[in-house]
Image (cartoon, rainbow, N blue to C red):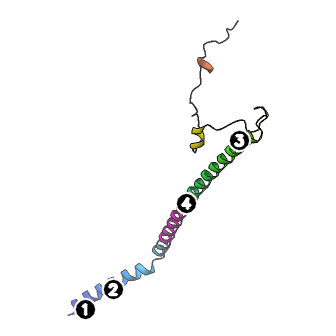
Amino acid sequence: MTWEYALIGLVVGIAIGAVAMRFGNRKLRDQQVMQNEIEKSKNELEQYRMELTSHFARSAELLDNMATDYRQLYQHMAQSSNSLLPNQPAHDNPFNYRLTGAEADNDQAPVQMPRDYSEGSSGLLRGDRPRRK
């Protein structure tokens, strides 16, 4: 019977020790707090990214509307200046530049993409270098 009490006492002691170590360990509690803070920061960052994405989408929509409205205003002013000042020379008319029909229908003005090279050779590979005397 003595062995049985000793064995039960050992098991109960190990269980109590494990529970005490689990809840009494300061490093483990600090790690748990840091893990919670990391999760909170991740959630806040994701929310901020979603707000930023919706902000830029709305800004792009407003800028597109504004560009369309300015294009329509310019066309209106150009047509009005031509009809109200029919005898004025083209170089005196402030609205002498007119958007073509394709540009008026298109939301974007034609853009020529920049090249990553020059027309001729330059620098060390240029063929017409001055000769040294």
Q: Amino acid at mark 3?
A: Ala
Q: Residue furthest top?
A: 133
Task: Using the image as rendered, state which of residue 33 and residue 113 is in the foreground.
Answer: 113
Count of marks, rendered view: 4
Residue at numbered disc 3: 78
Is 57 colored magenta in this rendering?
Answer: no
Query: Which one is earlier in the sequence, the residue at label 1 or at label 4?
Result: 1
Q: Amino acid at mark 1?
A: Tyr
Q: Secondary structure at mark 2?
A: helix
Q: Which mark is residue 13?
A: 2
Give left or right: position of 116 versus 66.
left
- Can you give x and y, in whole percent of width and height, for residue 93 in the image? 77, 36
Cβ–Cβ under 8 Å for marks 1 and 4: no
Query: Which one is earlier in the sequence, the residue at label 3 or at label 1?
Result: 1
Q: Secondary structure at mark 4?
A: helix
Residue at numbered disc 1: 5
Task: Using the image as rendered, state which of residue 90 and residue 27 is in the foreground.
Answer: 90
Residue at numbered disc 4: 54
How far is the residue under mark 1 from the one under mark 4? Answer: 68 Å
Residue visible at 58% across and 58% down? 58
Q: Residue furthest bottom?
A: 1
- Can you give x and y, in whole percent of width and height, for residue 94 in the image? 76, 38
**Dot in front, 3 or 1:** 3
Q: Which segment did they paint magenta?
A: 33-54
Query: Which one is earlier in the sequence, the residue at label 2 or at label 4?
Result: 2
Query: Which one is earlier in the sequence, the residue at label 4 or at label 3?
Result: 4
